[in-house]
Image (cartoon, coloured by chain):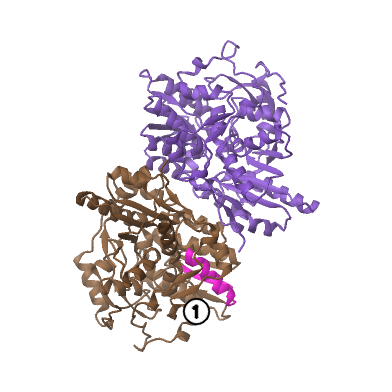
Chain colours: A brown, B purple
């Protein structure tokens, strides 16, 4: 019997997160006046203990005991050798994945939802607002808020709200209150609906709504929570890669290639940053973020200063961006439909420490079906994008006759996204690439935005 | 940090199943002539290697290496201490559960689907037919058939087919072909539709359809597969309890009470039979199967000889039965909507080795929500029935001030059953109890059936 899974016991869970800000140089976020923002400028939006994490340059940050307690509901996550997938591909590559689909909401998202709810609770916050794309983040934050007794309000991108009714049900089970975005509950939402009543919505719009509601609470007991993009979110997700390193060490393996799908960047950062640390310190390892061709932030957009939301409530962040007005095509991987990319991921791409890939929707589902029919587990639409790249690399290893070791993040299961698989089988899934018109539009949108400096960390 | 999970490595997986037929006396199944059937009578329906298991009285039966390989995709399943649930109930009881929701289809069902597909494959079978209630079994068999390269055709009880469209999608992902039952594809289905075109269907009807199709294949390459009731199914599920015993031993615990929900009996048998073995050998342990009040096979029906299906294709089995014509109320726990009960479970009930409980639907969901909001994971509707009993027992332990150890089987997650939770929150879920008319009807149905002997095993 070949061993598939490398397990860790609860007492082997990492006790510290890895903070990449200790090892790379970053352009600062800019305020409306064009000057670097100060931590206190963010205070109406986030609690101060999380803001401190956002700007910290400590390399290792302790994970609070109360956070570990909740993470232990499903963590450590198993590292799995995809033996059956390898056989089906007849590849000399050894393929490993971290199964992040075993968390109660079914994805990697609670890795940061839990600490965010915890730090807000400790800071005295009673209520969190947020946005969600595919619904993975919204359900993760509902779950986390339920664990700490905090209220949770979620603005869900309309197209996903309509495509994935079970996500809303799941949020309700944990006591979360989910509404479709754009909604009539905020000025940001009403403005968009007036211009385009049939808009499928976007993460950028939903973020504006959630921030607006948080800031509007005069009691000061409401804050906003973001499931990706920000430094502290990437920080919390590094538990994925830190566990993976321990697990691979146990079996004497080290990856040649590390792969994660990338929307806002958090799942990618989670698996990749601990390996970036190694790479900066001289290890040879290829690291690939994989995005959809429908929303090719890293592969086609400029590295520019842009807002994280469509209503320009957020500071200007130094990131690859398709423009804060960009509304991506309605692909099923709702979690990858974001106009921007985490500033740290963007910086790593600019420095050439990671090599970005884009795959189209149908190829992603081809790979997802292959995964389900070999390894048994059904991947989320987002995860399928990573899988398409894994399959490509495994085939390349076969062509080259090389025993490559591939590690990827299985970011979540697709059990609540099965309608998309129905459309795949019905031949109704489409591939999307950016039109010339869309390209012109985002270039125009960013025209008068400042440009980040071309920093070099190492 | 309190440890929640007791893990086993793959090399600690049980290598043998426990066969309760070695330890209890059973009435034989009877053929149409009223005489005990012979193994070869079952040959058109099942492959001979599974029939041999069905009638074996060996206490320990080896699990084939190829079966262990596939089970290792998700097994061993963690034993979890429900610390947060205990705290919410403020009980001195320590509550443990086996999390069977981590399998790819999300329930305990693949524990037998995998060996059944394997033995059929080894016997040269190319195609399996089956029925499914809630869809858990149909998706489990699709998954298992996909692993061994066998075709899979599933008749799904209409009410669940309509309530749970994602279950059908999931079967498609693994290549299974699912149709609503009663269908027009079989004589059994057409006969029912003629009498009652609007019938919600039942497991009894779906079984008839699946058997009819299997037997009709003249090439001899199709067989039928059943997800519960039969001896070999109970056998395969004992891996749950055998793992639990190893895990509890590791932490020096032994249960005072073992609880599992019971429809056909397989999940209950899985957690309970290894403890029945202990009980027969002098250990003190209370063992509770929990069924819905809408389908109270053990708590209200007679112990009689009855058919497993509505068209009377199966032999007469000695079991608690509401009558093979019984169509249970449309509760959401589709997996518990079966008129009969496994003969071995029925025999154990008749002998007083287990103590049957029935709970109503709303109380079951109350307990399910409590579980989701404390332990984080969302239970399947079937699992909620076990949970209602767990909550009752934990409250009783509190009243009595006793440190009871409760072990239950978390038979599956509810992520594909979220529509039922929506109905719960909307106040639309109903409780059902048998009407006088229903009682009279099943008594009449069984009137001229032979009665099992009152055997005593120990």
Element assignment for label 1: helix
Name the residue at 68% across, 36% down. B278
Q: Is A451 colored magenta in this rendering? A: no
Q: The N terminus of chain A is located in which quarter?
A: top left
User: The magenta stretch spans which residues?
Assistant: A111-130
Q: Quadrant of residue B351?
A: top right
- Whether B321 is drawn above or below A150: the answer is above
Q: Residues within 10 Å of mark 1 (few under 14, many from 20)?
A: some
Residue B135 at x, y percent in the picture? 49, 39
Q: Is residue A78 visible?
A: yes
- Whether A6 is drawn above or below A293: the answer is above
Q: How many marks?
A: 1
> Which one is nearer the viewer's eye here, A136 or A167?
A136
Q: Is residue A448 left or right of residue B427?
A: left
- Whether B109 is drawn above or below B367: the answer is above
> Which one is nearer the viewer's eye here, A81 or A343?
A81
Residue B349 at x, y percent in the picture? 70, 30
Residue A224 at x, y percent in the picture? 49, 74
> Which one is nearer the viewer's eye here, A98 or A367?
A98
Residue A33 at x, y percent in the picture? 36, 89
Q: Quadrant of residue A197?
A: bottom left
Which residue in the rendered view is the most extreme toward the right? Answer: B400
- Whether B255 is drawn above or below B435: the answer is below
Q: Which residue is mark 1?
A: A215
Q: Is A117 colored magenta in this rendering? A: yes
For disc 1, the chain is A
């Amino acid at each position: 019997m070949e061993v598939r899974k490398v397990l860790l016991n609860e007492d082997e869970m990492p006790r510290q997160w890895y903070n990449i800000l200790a090892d790379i140089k970053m352009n600062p976020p800019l305020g409306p006046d064009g000057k670097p923002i100060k931590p206190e400028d963010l205070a109406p939006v986030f609690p101060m203990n999380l803001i401190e994490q956002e700007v910290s340059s400590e390399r290792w940050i302790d994970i609070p005991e109360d956070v570990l307690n909740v993470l232990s509901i499903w963590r450590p996550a198993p590292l799995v050798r995809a033996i059956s997938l390898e056989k089906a591909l007849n590849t000399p590559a050894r393929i490993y994945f971290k199964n992040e689909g075993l968390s109660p909401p079914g994805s990697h998202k609670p890795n940061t939802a839990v600490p965010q709810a915890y730090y807000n609770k400790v800071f005295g916050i009673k209520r969190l607002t947020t946005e969600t794309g595919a619904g993975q983040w919204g359900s993760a934050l509902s779950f986390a808020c339920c664990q700490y007794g905090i209220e949770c309000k979620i603005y869900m991108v309309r197209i996903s709200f309509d495509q994935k009714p079970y996500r809303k049900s799941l949020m309700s089970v944990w006591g979360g209150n989910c509404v479709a975005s754009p909604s009539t509950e905020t000025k940001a939402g009403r403005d968009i609906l007036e211009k385009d009543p049939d808009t499928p919505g976007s993460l950028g719009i939903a973020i504006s709504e959630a921030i607006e509601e948080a800031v509007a609470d005069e009691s000061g007991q409401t804050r906003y929570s973001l499931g990706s993009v920000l430094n502290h979110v990437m920080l919390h997700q590094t538990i994925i890669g830190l566990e993976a390193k321990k697990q691979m060490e146990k079996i004497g393996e080290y990856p040649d290639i590390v792969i994660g799908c990338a929307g806002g960047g958090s799942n990618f950062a989670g698996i990749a940053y601990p390996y970036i640390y190694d790479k900066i310190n001289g290890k040879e390892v290829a690291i690939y973020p994989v995005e959809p061709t429908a929303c090719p932030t890293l592969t086609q957009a400029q590295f520019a200063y842009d807002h994280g939301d469509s209503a320009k409530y957020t500071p200007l962040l130094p990131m690859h961006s398709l423009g804060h007005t960009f509304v991506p095509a309605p692909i099923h991987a709702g979690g990858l439909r974001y106009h921007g990319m985490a500033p740290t991921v963007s910086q790593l791409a600019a420095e050439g420490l990671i090599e970005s890939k884009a795959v189209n929707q149908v190829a992603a589902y081809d790979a997802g079906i292959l995964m389900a029919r070999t390894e048994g587990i059904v991947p989320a639409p987002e995860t399928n994008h990573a899988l398409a790249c894994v399959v490509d690399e495994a085939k390349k290893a076969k062509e080259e006759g090389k025993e490559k070791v591939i590690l990827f993040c299985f970011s979540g299961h697709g059990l609540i996204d099965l309608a998309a698989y129905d459309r795949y089988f019905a031949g109704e899934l489409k591939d999307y690439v950016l039109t010339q018109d869309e390209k012109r539009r985002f270039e125009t949108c960013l025209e008068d935005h400042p440009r980040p400096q071309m920093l070099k960390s190492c």
